[in-house]
Image: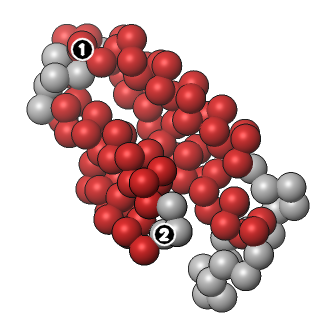
Amino acid sequence: MALAFLYATAVQYNDPDPYYWMPIYLIPAVISLLIFFGRGNSLKPVLLILALIYLAGTYYMWPAHWEGVALQHGMKTINIEEGRESLGLAIAGFTLVVYFLALNRHKHIIT
């Protein structure tokens, strides 16, 4: 997941508001790396809070009318842009939830 989030961070450089979206994807990338290298236990309290923030952002950014993500035709409407942004937040949020659950369930395996 770290590589996926690092890629998502990198492609935000040409976004109109990269100062928002680069940190949004960089945070789960760093967390993924910390967990991979066995440094995840200290993140437990933060993981749940961040997951809730990301999932609340998903709800907030969800488009008024779902038009999909239209990969072939670019972003023709605000609904497509908001759809992509909300899905990115959802992926990050659910990833953080999975990390939180894994750290609490498999303490002896992950640490």
Kindly report which numbered mark, 1 or 2, lies closer to the viewer in this rendering: 2
Q: Image quadrant for the C terminus?
A: top left
Mark 1 → mark 2, Cα distance in angstroms: 34 Å
* Residue at point 41%, 65% (across, down): 12
Residue 64 vs 70, above or below: the answer is: above
Q: Is residue 90 left or right of residue 21?
A: right
Residue 48 visible from this viewpoint: yes
Residue 10 vs 32, above or below: the answer is: below
Coordinates of residue 62 in the picture (x, y in percent): 75, 50
* Residue at point 48%, 50% (across, down): 20
The picture quadrant where one finds residue 65 is bottom right
Q: Residue furthest left?
A: 37
Residue 97 visible from this viewpoint: no
Q: Is residue 39 left or right of residue 85?
A: left
Q: Secondary structure at mark 2?
A: loop
For disc 1, the marked residue is: 41
Label 1: few (<14), some (14–19) or many (≥20) C-alpha neighbours in 10 Å? some
Coordinates of residue 58 in the picture (x, y in percent): 65, 42
Q: Secondary structure at mark 1?
A: helix
Q: Is residue 111 left or right of residue 5?
A: left
Residue 11 vs 74, above or below: the answer is: above
* Residue at point 58%, 44% (across, down): 90
Amino acid type for the residue under numbered disc 1: Asn
Q: Which of the marked residues, 1 or 2, is nearer the chain's N terminus? A: 2
Q: Residue furthest right?
A: 65
Amino acid type for the residue under numbered disc 2: Asp
The picture quadrant where one finds residue 28 is top left
For disc 2, the marked residue is: 15
Coordinates of residue 71 in the picture (x, y in percent): 60, 80
Between 12 and 45, the residue placed more toward the observer is 12
